């Protein structure tokens, strides 16, 4: 089949989860030509979609995205109305739905949600835990990387302001460079510098190669018992990384960190 000469070629373009792979024919009506495109969905299915539905963001998948969201609404974890669940849904949509106003700052520039979180709220909640307060929201330590357990924390607006992309030119000793440039000059991992900035460290400490972020203690003693962090985490239904964040990122005292189970458990 030959694409009509007046039609725009969309082969190779991406709309949500759909990638246009070939022309699928057209229907000619008085004053109107309705073009269809064959699209490959991220889930592996192929579907024919009207060009107008693609360009207007009416079709973002073969139908799998709608089905997944419907299944999530029917889930039995009992947390569909919580702030944590709302954060998870918004995180996925801003990375996958081009019709959202903030999509250009997320999915539009390559920010993705890791596979572990994309299809499981339970995994997301196990890794992130409860939102510490109404002032906290999800924050990516490295704003050029996606949403994943290793790159996300709950942070206040003040902390997030320190981590905006526009703030990633740092001045120290009269010199101004990007975080990447400082990392290369000082032989410090770029994420380490970003982590320090997010935690509110002053620039001179954030760029000091001799400074170190708090380590992840392998053993914790509490109430006369001494166990590995992974064992304490298992007892309250957390992942070890989530317990580490409670203690070292959010500053929870051991009493609270080791006795507060995940909500709903």
Image: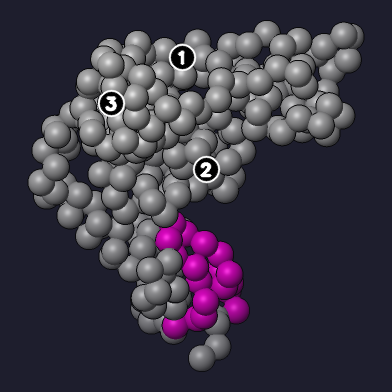
Q: CA distance from mark 1 to mark 2?
A: 19 Å
The residue lying at 27 percent from left, 37 percent from top is 234
How many other residues sit within 10 Å of disc 3, few (<14), some (14-19) or many (≥20)? some
Furthest-bottom residue in this view = 1
Q: Which residues are magenta?
A: 5-24
Q: Which label is found at residue 146?
A: 2
Q: Which image quarter is the C terminus in?
A: top left
The image quadrant of residue 223 is top left
The image quadrant of residue 227 is top left
Mark 3 highlights which residue? 130
For the residue pair 38 and 176, the one nearer the viewer reads as: 176
Mark 1 highlights which residue? 157
From this view, report whether residue 27 is shown above or below residue 136.
below
The residue lying at 60 percent from left, 79 percent from top is 5
Q: Which label is found at residue 129?
A: none
Task: Indicate the secondary structure of the residue bearing disc 1.
Answer: helix
Q: Are marks 1 and 2 in contact (CB under 8 Å)?
A: no
Percent across and percent down for residue 195 are 60, 24
């Amino acid at each position: 089949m030959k694409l009509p000469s007046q039609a725009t070629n969309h082969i190779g373009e991406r709309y949500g989860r759909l990638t246009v792979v070939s022309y699928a024919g057209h229907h000619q009506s008085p004053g109107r030509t309705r073009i269809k495109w064959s699209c490959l969905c991220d889930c592996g299915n192929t579907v024919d979609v009207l060009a107008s539905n693609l360009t207007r963001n009416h079709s973002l998948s073969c139908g799998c995205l709608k089905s997944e969201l419907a299944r999530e609404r029917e889930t039995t974890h009992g947390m569909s109305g919580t702030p944590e669940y709302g954060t998870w849904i918004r995180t996925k949509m801003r990375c996958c739905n081009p019709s959202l106003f903030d999509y250009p700052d997320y999915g539009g520039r390559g920010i993705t949600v890791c596979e572990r979180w994309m299809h499981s709220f339970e995994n997301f909640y196990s890794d992130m835990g409860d939102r510490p307060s109404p002032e906290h929201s999800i924050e990516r330590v490295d704003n050029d990387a996606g949403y994943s357990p290793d790159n996300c924390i709950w942070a206040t607006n003040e902390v997030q302001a320190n981590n905006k992309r526009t703030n990633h030119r740092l001045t120290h000793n009269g010199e101004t460079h990007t975080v990447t440039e400082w990392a290369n000059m000082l032989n410090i991992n770029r994420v380490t510098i970003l982590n320090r900035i997010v935690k509110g460290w002053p620039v001179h400490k954030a760029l000091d190669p001799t400074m170190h972020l708090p380590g992840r203690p392998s053993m914790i003693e509490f109430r006369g018992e001494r166990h590995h962090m992974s064992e304490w985490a298992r007892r309250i239904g957390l992942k070890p990384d989530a317990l580490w964040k409670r203690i070292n990122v959010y500053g929870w005292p051991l009493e609270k960190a080791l006795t507060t189970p995940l909500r709903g458990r």
